Image (cartoon, rainbow, N blue to C red):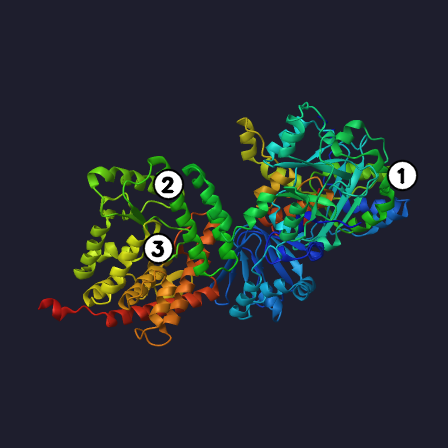
Amino acid sequence: MRGIRPRQKVTQADWAGYMAQRAGSAKDPDIKRFFSAPLPAPDTPIADVPMVALDVETTGLDERRHAIVSIGVVPFTLNRIKLAKRRYWVVNPSRPLAETSIAFHHITHSEVAEAPDLDVVLNELLEMLAGHLVVVHFRNIERPFLDAAIQDRRGEGVMFPMIDTMSLEARMHRQTLWARFRRWLGRPPVSIRLNASRERYGLPSYQGHHALTDALATAELLQAQIATHYRPDTPLKDIWC
Amino acid sequence: MDVELLEIRQFMGQFPPFDGLSDELLDAIAERVEVSYFKTGSDILVVNDTINELCFIRSGAVEVYRRKGELYNRLGEGDIFGHFSLLRNHKVRFPAQAIEDTLIYFIPKDVFQRLCEEDDDFADFVELERPRLETAAEQQKKSNDMIVTRIRKLVTRYPVMVEATTSLQQAAQQVSDAQASAAIVIKQYAGNPRYSFQDSEGKTWHMVGIFTDSDFRTRVVAEGLSSQTPIGDVASPHLITVQSDASVYEAMLTMLRNNVHHLPVLYRQRPVGVVHLSDIIRYETHSGLYLVSNIFNQSSVQGLARLAPDVRASFVRMVQEDANSQMVGSALSTIGRSFTRRLLELAEAELGPPPVPYCFMVNGSMARNEQSIVTDQDNALILSDDFVPEEHDAYFYALAKFVSDGLDACGYTYCKGDIMATNTQWRQPLSVWKSYFEDWISNPTPKKLLQSSIFFDLDSIYGEDHFVETLQDLIASRAAESPLFLAAMARNALGRTPPLGFFRTFVMEKDGKHNNSINLKRRGTAPMVDLVRIHALACGSKAQNTFQRLNDINHTQLLATGVSDKLSYAFEFLCMSRLRHQMIDIQEDRAPDNNIEPENVEDSERHTLKDAFQVLSNAQKFLKFRYPMPAQRQRT
């Protein structure tokens, strides 16, 4: 089993300040443009926030050894998920593929050769994300992988605030008194994986492990979570991280 | 890059009106769908809002209301709403609310309009303004729906796919785990453009062949191959496939032409399922012919009992395909008769030939050819007058018991009123039966007739048919001459009356009381059958079927002009309504019954049902007047 390295916690940073600072210091014009796009203010009601669901499929779980193979992006708001504006890319991980990751992800050397490098689609990707709040399920994949991949190609990384549906789910099911009580009783923790979480809200099960389907599934999950546990006027700062 | 939203198009493609669309149109929908989640109790459509999308329920449940708050419809997974307003002024007429956590796919207006323009069936489905008769007549034209149904409708799950390097044993394991009967063998793309496809991760595969259950026998076991042999070495290299929007008929022809029983179904290049010959046969059983021949092929009661689900499936398909109640009733009666005949054959094989000739008689709905899917058994034995109880009755009791138990096992439950050949009273020689009928007709009391009226629907299904014909003749000649008998029958027939109609989610009784549901047999079809039977007896008709009886009555002056047509129409509607609700019960995994719940009754159905109840109620009033109890004569 491959483990997940403990991450440095990105705290409730001053995202606006960080974005402005990066907009000033960025050398790469595309990255500069990305950081210059204004983000919704932390007090913006979630219903007014333009969002984009993002999912990347990778060759493994460690951004230092593994790489991105496909990216799915679906823009949405609390009201509507806009499938017509979706994007999906298969990209060349451009790192030597371990035999184990071939087995894990059915990605072969010959196919890798056919796909473009992430660098080619990066501008399009950044354009879709700019000015939107990015929504992922389990940010500890998307955030470090994107950061490392862009760092590799442009010499500077990209960080931005995210809404993580998995950590929202953890708030409900892992951090409550009841959850602690269950743990004390030796019960297995409630699963907060994408499909298990969706099931709790009556959402249908989709075939997993396709970046686009998972992005759609994540967007639906966030709509369900807000409808169930929050309100349309909940400020963004209570949800992002 | 073109992204195939398989997840969405596959799902929508299972439901009408999307199931008849071409793959191209389905893609056009999936491309443009917008999605939204609605918590229980939240509004989806609000009156007078502008509507620009058709709503499709991906999961959950929705209620649609009339403006005054009356429930208009309750919808579930796969249903659509909003099309009324889309077709008119784009203002929401019927508000909609989620009654469960619900996921809606919204289809933009321009896509909806394109669907209406390019696909007539889709347009028909959403345009309810068209006269029902016209639509019904068009439906008839499409009697052979194998040509219009697309093969993807028969695909219920993803195919089992194994890599060519997989061992036979592992492959067999995967096929068994999936309860499938074939696996598609694939290997990594090697430059052959034919039968290559991309999986969800963008990886290209090449379809090498298919490996079926029978291949395991013929190519592996019979050849003595090791179970560790890679499946790619033995898989049949001749791959015959069909496109997902081909018709069922094309798929069947492909199977016949190539003599294969499994067909991989492809969406463009990608395999989306495997259909087996039996899927097609199961689909094409609406005539019931396949089922009937299958009944006669069974050699045991267990074998017969295993066909019960097929009876239900065949029933559901007939109702879905807008068969009328006569077609459904006579098909189900034919099936029921076949079960009974086969059981009698099996019983005779076990017990030996009968010691004296006999006739196995059925009564009630089976005799009238009006069976529904909710039915018990009503039968009796008419024995030859050579019958000697001490010598022969043990045989006939055993015979009756074999059949009765067998029918029960096949889903025809025991008769609660004990109208069965196992009851000594109903297992008698012809002469005794004649005296029964003589007594019922000459000395009728309502009480006596309450129990025996079911015998006035009678038909032979096995053995000496002329025994039953003798009784039918006797009834036809004697009943019409006996006003007292007709009056007693009429009084009984008035014991069950229809309700007034519906109000919101209640059944409105004539006294203004509300009920939550209505038994459509007890309050509708059965009183109608009783009523028509009396008129038929009065005019000497030997017909057993209610429609045929009405036809006979129509040739007399018994009823005012046009009345028998009205009764016929009302009866048809009551029967269809009952059948449709039984179908819904089956589809929703409930035991079918004769009850209908008003919230499940569509608006148009409500109005017509109310009319049908009115026709029945008027006819009952006439019955009382037409066959009065001849009181004076009784006293003298």
Q: Position of residue A13 (x, y in %)?
A: 75, 41
Q: Residues within 10 Å of mark 2 (few under 14, many from 20)?
A: many
Q: Is residue A56 above or below residue B433?
A: above
Q: Marks 1 and 3: same chain?
A: no
Helix, strand or loop status at disc 3: helix
Q: CA distance from mark 1 to mark 2?
A: 81 Å
Q: Is B92 in front, or is A229?
A: B92
Task: List the residue tagged with mark 1.
Answer: A155
Task: List the residue tagged with mark 3.
Answer: B367
- Quadrant for the C terminus of chain B, please: bottom left
Q: Chain of mark 3?
A: B
Q: Residue at x 65, y 57 (%)?
A: B21
Q: Amino acid at mark 1?
A: Gly
Q: Amino acid at mark 2?
A: Gly
Helix, strand or loop status at disc 1: loop
Disc 2 + disc 3, Cβ < 8 Å: no
Q: Position of residue A120 (x, y in %)?
A: 87, 45
Helix, strand or loop status at disc 2: helix
Q: Amino acid at mark 3?
A: Ala
Task: List the residue tagged with mark 2.
Answer: B406
Q: Chain of mark 1?
A: A
Q: Is B471 in front, or is A103?
A: B471
Q: CA distance from mark 2 to mark 3?
A: 19 Å
Q: Is B10 in front, or is A90?
A: B10
Q: Is residue A82 above or below residue B219?
A: below
Q: Is residue A172 above or below residue A42?
A: above
